[in-house]
Image (cartoon, rainbow, N blue to C red):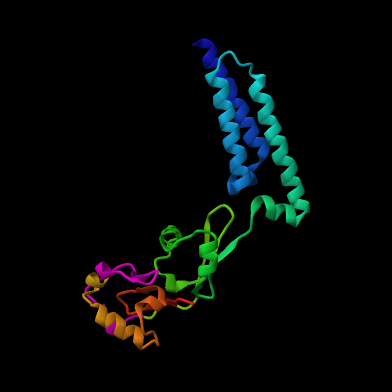
Amino acid sequence: MLMLFFRTIFVYFIVFVTMRIMGKREIGKLSVFDLVISIMIAEIAVFVLEDMNKSLMDGILPMFTLVGVQLIIAYLSLKNEKIRRLFEGKSSLIIENGKLNREEMRRQRYNLDDLLLQLRQSKVMDVANVEFAILEPSGKLTVVEKKEPAAAPAEGKSLFRYEGLPLPLIMDGKVQDENLEKLGKTRFWLKSELQTQGIKEFKDVFFCTFDHRGKWFVDRRR
């Protein structure tokens, strides 16, 4: 037990040193390549601790080998853009000029629920307020909001009984009936409103939200 205790402390400091060698930038952004390195180092550390008959060098050597590989590739990435794109990937525009880029969302297997979740994490409650949304290689969503403020309803009163976050009324061409109920509205009302915007069928809409101030966001299928 005493040997296991000291081995654990020793391995902890070895892993700590390897993380420090990798640098703040690599740990902070944690690209796919850095994530793989980190997972492998953690697995090697556990492997050494589980088998007391294994020499510590059986763990230390692979750990520092991985760190060496990581440092070499990080250095080459600074010098060569193609290598950087190969190992780190590139950013993806999910919203561009206020419009959803569905092709890129499909390519990244990034759905509407993912988008709404990360927008809320960025303290953005309405897709209609977003000018650009960029999915970074680390998986983080960078959001640039529109400059113009949202229009307020007449006389400062809510248009509907529901007051809160913008409600998705159509997602992937399907009407969200429970959200219509929150507004106290029907599919007939929704279809009439869409027709005023030149949209005939619900299936022609990829994503649509509406808030209590009367602000719409409609993204059509292409």
Question: Within the image, what quadrant is residue 27 found in?
Answer: top right
Q: Residue furthest top?
A: 2
Residue drawn at x 75%, y 51% as measured from the top left = 78
Query: In the displayed structure, does residue 115 sit left or right of residue 35?
Result: left
- The residue drawn where x is 36% and y is 81% is 201
Quadrant position of residue 65: top right
Is residue 3 rendered to the left or right of residue 152? right
- x and y percentages locating residue 184 in the rendered image: 21, 75
Residue 16 seen in render: yes
Q: Where is residue 145 in the image (x, y as percent from the top left)?
A: 49, 70
The answer to which image quadrant residue 24 occupies is top right
Where residue 178 sits in the image (x, y, percent)?
25, 67
Residue at image coords 57%, 37%: 39
Q: Can residue 159 be seen in this view?
A: no
Q: In this view, does 111 lie above or below 76?
A: below
Residue 54's spot in the image, x, y percent? Answer: 61, 16
Q: Look at the image and say whether residue 50 sits in the magenta stretch.
A: no
Q: What stretch is highlighted in magenta?
A: 152-179
Q: Is residue 178 magenta?
A: yes
